[in-house]
Amino acid sequence: MSKPKNIDEFINRNRAAIAANPECGTSRYNLAVGLLGLQQYDEAKKELLAAVNCCPTLAEAYVLIGGICLREGDLEGCLKYNKMAINSRAGFAEGHGNIGFVYLQMGKIDDAIYHLEKAVRWNPNFLQAFSNLGNAYLMQGKIDDSIETNKKAIELEPNFPVAHTNLAIAYLEKGLTDLAVEHCDKAVALGYEVPEEILAEVDKVRS
């Protein structure tokens, strides 16, 4: 079968596949991906729910439902569906990373660290999980662990400003002011809005 020319053709092909086989979870998942591309979130969510009803082990579908919940400001819903994702597939790094992120938003730092550590263990290239884990360590006062983790994020993506900002904060905590200035300036140069209080602290210690 030839590659679809555009998103509308992709959607139409999957609608046809579903009409021929309504119990095909993969076609429903693919249709939902197309609908998300058109920002048709309600219809996409309906198809994703149908997809996991047809195929309960479709972990990626649970993650997408969780993403829609997060977009709606429903942290509990996001948590619920990402937990379903990791229950449907052991070692599913994206689900653990998302759970960790939600727990971070809820202020449940220990729970966040538990899942983010699992996420980076299962996927050592999971940039966002490393960044969130570094942030969680910082919030818990584990400064050395935060530095090590954010360095790993920068190894994966040298121009990742969140990790540079986290490093600036961690180095300020350690009294390593030259490194704090270096990483803060890098984050600013990358266009990141570093919190005003951090900028003020860095300005105080500039040599």
Image (cartoon, helix red, strand yellow):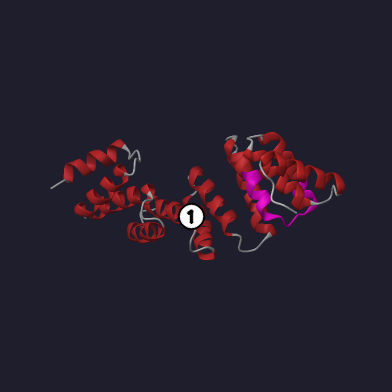
Give neighbour class at mark 1: few <14, some 14-19, many 20+ (Cα, 10 Å). Answer: many
The quarter in which the N terminus is drawn is: bottom right
Which residue is more in the foreground, 136 or 34? 34
Instruction: Specify the quadrant of the image occupied by residue 151.
Output: bottom left
Q: Is residue 21 left or right of residue 107?
A: right
The amino acid marked with disc number 1 is Ala
What is the count of numbered marks? 1
Which residue is more in the foreground, 62 or 108? 62
Element under label 1? helix
Q: Is residue 7 magenta?
A: no
Q: Main secondary structure of the magenta part?
A: helix
Q: Is residue 103 left or right of residue 183?
A: right
Which residue is more in the foreground, 179 or 83? 179
Residue 55: % across, % down: 77, 54
Highlighted range, magenta: 50-66
Q: Is residue 51 magenta?
A: yes
Which residue position is annotated with label 1? 129
